[in-house]
Image: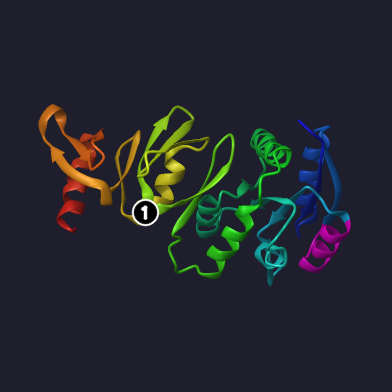
Amino acid sequence: MLTISAVIVEDEIPVAKSLETLLDQNDKVNVLGMAHNVIDARKMILEKKPDLVFCDIQLGKSETGFDLIEQFPEASFKLIFVTAFNEYAIKAFKYSAIDYLLKPVDPEELEEALKRTCKKIEFEEPQKEIQSLIQMMKNPSDRPKKILFKTSEQIKAVDVSSIIRLESESNYTSVYLNDGKKLLVSKSLKEYSDILEERYFFRSHQSHLINLEFFDVYEKNDGGYIKLTDGTTVPVSKRKKSLLFELLESI
């Protein structure tokens, strides 16, 4: 893993120092400094030019981390939000493929986030995530038309309407698109069901999430299954059948 430089943006000094302590235990991370408000953070980022910025959402009573990143729409740094749970913000992070850590920071989750960040830096991946996040935060009532998926090789922007189905494969999720392509991403199916089920997607089974726009027929044979327009068949768990029928009646 290459050495990366980092800046911590956190208004709570004990929390900032705790994160710094965790990062100091990793000899591949060099913490350049800490800032506790937007003005100082902007100045530090411009001066230090870090590879990575750890940023809290709430900075004091009136500022947020979003106020900061809006000033860097073409950011050269990678971003990891460190936050207390905020349902809408977490949903925005998932759509935009932004890494985030929940407080208190778990050392193992931090290590995994650093590995992903190093990989992005090593392969010089373009920073699509911040632009996507800013767009979503500026239009909170709009449902994003695209979602970013991180594979081992790239960050892919995908039209939500082009997703036929998602299938759980151990700790990974396979995403099947209507152009015949398949993406393998290192996120659980639950993460995607949390944000896509409000977009006409249906969790038919613990291992399957389908786009009902591609629904073809429900077969009662063999315990019941759904056939999609691409010819794929997916099972329907017993407890999901009544919900499926309700959804189909509302079409």
Q: Position of residue 185 (x, y in %)?
A: 50, 36
**Residue at screen point 68% across, 36% down:** 119
Task: Pinpoint residue 166: horizontal percent, then vertical percent.
Answer: 38, 39
The C terminus: image quadrant: bottom left
Instruction: Name the image quarter holding residue 152.
Output: top right
* Residue 154 placement (x, y as % from top left): 58, 41
Task: Please state if 24 lies on the left or on the right of 202 as rendered.
Answer: right
Q: Nearer the viewer, residue 86 or 74?
A: 74
Left or right of residue 182, residue 3 in this image: right
The residue that appears at 26% across and 35% down in the rendered structure is: 232
The secondary element bearing badge 1 is classed as helix
Q: Where residue 186 sits in the image (x, y, percent)? A: 53, 35
User: Which residue in the protein does label 1 denote?
Assistant: 161
Q: Is residue 86 above or below residue 226?
A: below
Q: Which residues are magenta?
A: 35-47
Q: Is residue 94 magenta?
A: no
Relative to residue 106, is residue 160 depicted above or below? Answer: below
- Quick one: 45 or 16, which is closer to the camera? 45
Q: Residue furthest bottom?
A: 62
Q: Amino acid at mark 1?
A: Ser
Query: Could you tell me which residue is drawn at 50 percent across and 54 percent down?
Result: 91
Between 101 and 77, which is closer to the camera in this rendering? 77
Residue at 66 percent across and 39 percent down: it is: 113
Q: Main secondary structure of the magenta part?
A: helix
What residue occupies the far left of the structure in this picture? 221
| Quadrant of the snapshot with the N terminus | top right
> 31 or 167, which is in the foreground?
167
